[in-house]
Amino acid sequence: MNSTFKTVSSSHITISELMLPSHTNFSGKIHGGYILSLLDQIAFACASRFSGNYCVTASVDTVNFLKPIEVGELVTMKASVNYVGTSSMIIGIRVEAENIQTGVVKHCNSSYFTMVSKDKEGKNVPVPGLILTTLKEVSRFQNCVKQIALKKEREYQRSIATFGSIETILSLNQYNVKVELK
């Protein structure tokens, strides 16, 4: 068991960036890929600060784009460690966009990244334990435990699935798909 523990608050990272026309997609909104890049950067910074090591992205578990972000808005991302395993951490990130002329702030995105702590040779290294000091932190940790269990169940179901069987192919008629095997 790990003898070093750190608080969730020791992992907090906040970044803000003004959204420019060069960040837009074809509809004039901020490109989701650009936001994903910023999310990966803050997840790295948060995990590295907490673990004291170089960290890599193992998975992007959830990205919910809730509202579009406009050119000229100030985007603020807030990240913290929500869960720790042996060498992995789940980083929760909240994205808000502020209209700097009106002061109106909207919640635009929530994301969860799994990051893994590495040593100089690229091997996984243990991370500190997590000290939970608020009910919100406990709730976030428990939510991660549930998400990990659901992820393992999905992986198990995928491993036993019979994709390509006659029964599975015939059941596809309830979807908006046409099967034309050659």
Image (spheres, rainbow, N blue to C red):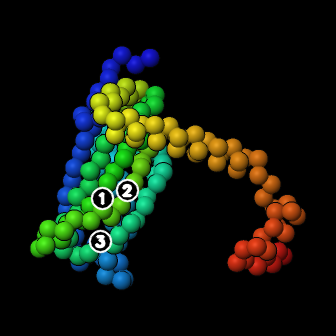
Quadrant housing residue 96: bottom left
- Residue under numbered circle 1: 95
Say whether disc 2 or disc 1 marks the residue closer to the N-terminus: 1
Checking the image for residue 137, the label placed there is: none
- Which amino acid, by three-letter code, is at mark 2? Ser
Mark 3 falls on what kind of element? Answer: loop
Q: Is residue 106 visible?
A: yes
User: Badge 3: few (under 14), some or many (20 or more) residues near its Cα, within 10 Å?
Assistant: many
Quadrant of image for the C terminus? bottom right
Mark 2 falls on what kind of element? Answer: strand
Q: Nearer the viewer, residue 155 or 107?
A: 107
Residue appearing at x 22%, y 65% in the figure? 105
Disc 2 to disc 3, how far (Cα)? 13 Å
User: Badge 1: few (under 14), some or many (20 or more) residues near its Cα, within 10 Å?
Assistant: many
Say whether disc 3 or disc 1 marks the residue closer to the N-terminus: 3
- Which amino acid, by three-letter code, is at mark 3? Ile
Does residue 83 appear left or right of residue 15 in this picture? right
User: Badge 2: few (under 14), some or many (20 or more) residues near its Cα, within 10 Å?
Assistant: some
Residue appearing at x 35%, y 78% in the figure? 25
Quadrant housing residue 52: top left
- Residue under numbered circle 2: 110
- Residue under numbered circle 3: 69
Residue appearing at x 52%, y 44% in the figure? 147
Image coordinates of residue 60 in percent, x first then y, are 46, 52
